[in-house]
Amino acid sequence: MSLHRLLLLAAVASLLAAPSVGQLALNADTPKLSSLAFGWVSMSGVDPTLDAMASFAPTMLGIREAGYSLGGEVATGTFSFSGFDVDSGWQSAQTNLGPGVLRLVHYRFNSNTAEVAGMQLPPIVPPGTPPLLLNTFGDSVEVSYAQRIGTTGVGISLVPTDSATISVYQGGATMATGKSKTDYGYRVGAVAPLKGAPNVRVGANFSYQKDESTLTPNAAHPLVVLSGAVPDTDRYITRAYTLGASSRLAPRTTVYGSYQKIFGKGGSMDREAELIWFGVTQQLSDAVAVRANYLDGGLNVGLSCRTPIGLLIAAYTNKALLNAKDVLGTGDSLFVGIDIAR
């Protein structure tokens, strides 16, 4: 049911992070950009009409309407960029509650400590100086509720925590550390069949998040002394608007697409990103389905297989996070997961 979640995770992250991380501004923007890249807003979906156990709240109603009372999903994978690797994944659990569905999701990510293609030393540094190394990790929790009102599924998600931590190293010493943490976040949305065309679903969601971010340079590090960087704290607002539609063209063929715009503002950051996403799912048999998807120049493919223990899922992306090539370089990603319901 949630193959598209793996595909989205392989394609969406780092949309807002690329230019600012590449410039390595030593201020509070840096940890906030890690949260924008791999945290709740970027990782929790871009398609508002396909049933999923860990995505927009209205789309989780599919499990209940398929006759199940409990459901869960676990997924894990890795982005690989010439030595810089980011492991990411999530765990979700949901249960029927009253007329609707209650869900809890935990997202997490962590990287190794390595060079990042777009994060370079200043040109005034002598040749042979050890390079900059980056490490980042974080997690977030989302609580969601959705129910059907007439033919329309409506839902809300609350985010009690979403944090990201970064560390920058050079020459075997810590150059700077930072952390971004949410004050609060929420999302509201709806999905419904199109009037006069019951095989077509349309959906929309709005997300809002308020954060505080802090960066603390190591005052004794030579590059910090050279740059004049000082401790910095700022507040940030993130907003995201998502519109989409899907249609069953034939009993075994579904097409879908969406448009998403994300805004991030605060400190010295004033950024926005647009996403155009579309793809097709083909059910090869009652047990096996394949997908092919496009998102802003990136291609990803996926396979799902229904087994006695649950729905097994795998997804691969070539040229993952193509929009962040100037920072991460060229890379790819592989994710696997399992859905279980009863």
Image: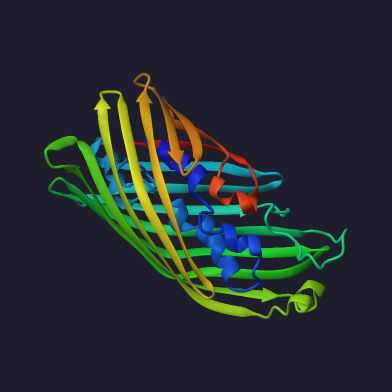
226 left or right of 84 in image: right
Outermost top residue: 285
Residue drawn at x 21%, y 52% is 98
Quadrant showing the C terminus: top left
Asked whether residue 13 is in view, the answer is: yes
Asked whether residue 97 is in view, the answer is: no
The quarter of the displayed image where residue 227 is located:
bottom right
The quarter of the displayed image where residue 76 is located:
top right
Residue drawn at x 23%, y 50% is 100
Which one is in front, 245 or 53?
Answer: 245
Which one is in front, 14 or 145?
Answer: 14
Q: Is the residue 220 above or below the residue 99 in the image?
A: below
Residue drawn at x 29%, y 39% is 63
Which one is in front, 178 or 159?
Answer: 178
How far from the left and from the top, in percent, is residue 130? 83, 59
261 left or right of 220 in image: left
What colour scheme does the image use? rainbow
Quadrant showing the N terminus: top left
How far from the left and from the top, in percent, is residue 159? 40, 63
**Count of numbered marks:** 0
100 left or right of 232 in image: left
Residue drawn at x 49%, y 35% is 300
Q: Is the residue 226 above or below the residue 97 in the image?
A: below
How far from the left and from the top, in percent, is residue 291? 42, 30
How far from the left and from the top, in percent, is residue 140? 48, 59
Q: Is the residue 8 above or below the residue 34 in the image?
A: above
The quarter of the displayed image where residue 166 is located:
bottom right
